Image (cartoon, helix red, strand yellow):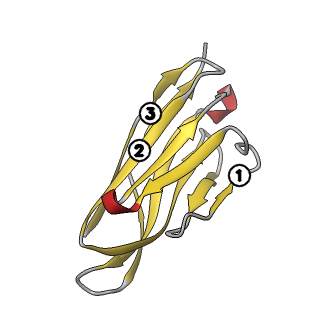
Amino acid sequence: QVQLVESGGGLVQPGGSLRLSCAASGSIFSIRAMGWYRQAPGKEHDLVARITSGGSTNYADSVKGRFTISRDNAKNTVFLQMNSLKPEDTAVYYCNAGVIDSRTFGYLEVFGRGTLVTVSS
């Protein structure tokens, strides 16, 4: 079994910054892409940013230039640095990873439970 645990959410004023972290643990042989999704109240579950095992990244247009995704492969951890936050960034942020299970060598798409980010004055 594989678990993803997010941390770093909270309340921040518009223009502020937050850094989200997500650590993967369990029966992991390797991790392919990792990413962050978000879901605001009444809206779809949208991709925010994604990073491959080789370090290639892609971002939603709404966060380009403000958010940066990075990962530490040795620690099975992914980060999301969020700068110049706006009220419309308010959402629950979910970590995602594509994992090769060490028990079965099967591919799993795993999501964390989410961490709430609120941008408000």
Query: On the image, numbered disc 3 is attached to which residue?
Result: 9
Closer to the N terminus: mark 3 or mark 2? Answer: 3
The kind of residue tagged 3 is: Gly
Numbered mark located on residue 113 in the image: none
Answer few, some or many: residues within 10 Å of disc 1's Cα (few below 14, many 20 plus, some between 14 and 19): few
Q: Image point 36% across, 75% down: which residue?
A: 30
Mark 1–mark 2 distance (CA, rounded to whole Å): 19 Å
Query: On the image, numbered disc 1 is attached to which residue?
Result: 60
Quarter of the image where one finds residue 68:
top right
Query: Compared with residue 9, is residue 103 higher up or lower down, i.e. above or below?
Result: below
Mark 3–mark 2 distance (CA, rounded to whole Å): 9 Å
Answer few, some or many: residues within 10 Å of disc 2's Cα (few below 14, many 20 plus, some between 14 and 19): many
**Which corner quadrant holds the C terminus?**
top right
Per the image, label 2 sits on a secondary structure element best described as strand
Answer few, some or many: residues within 10 Å of disc 3's Cα (few below 14, many 20 plus, some between 14 and 19): some
Numbered mark located on residue 21 in the image: 2
Q: Residue furthest top?
A: 121
The kind of residue tagged 2 is: Ser
Q: Image point 33% across, 61% down: which residue?
A: 74
Image position, residue 62 (x, y; %): 74, 44
Per the image, label 1 sits on a secondary structure element best described as loop
Quarter of the image where one finds residue 40:
top right
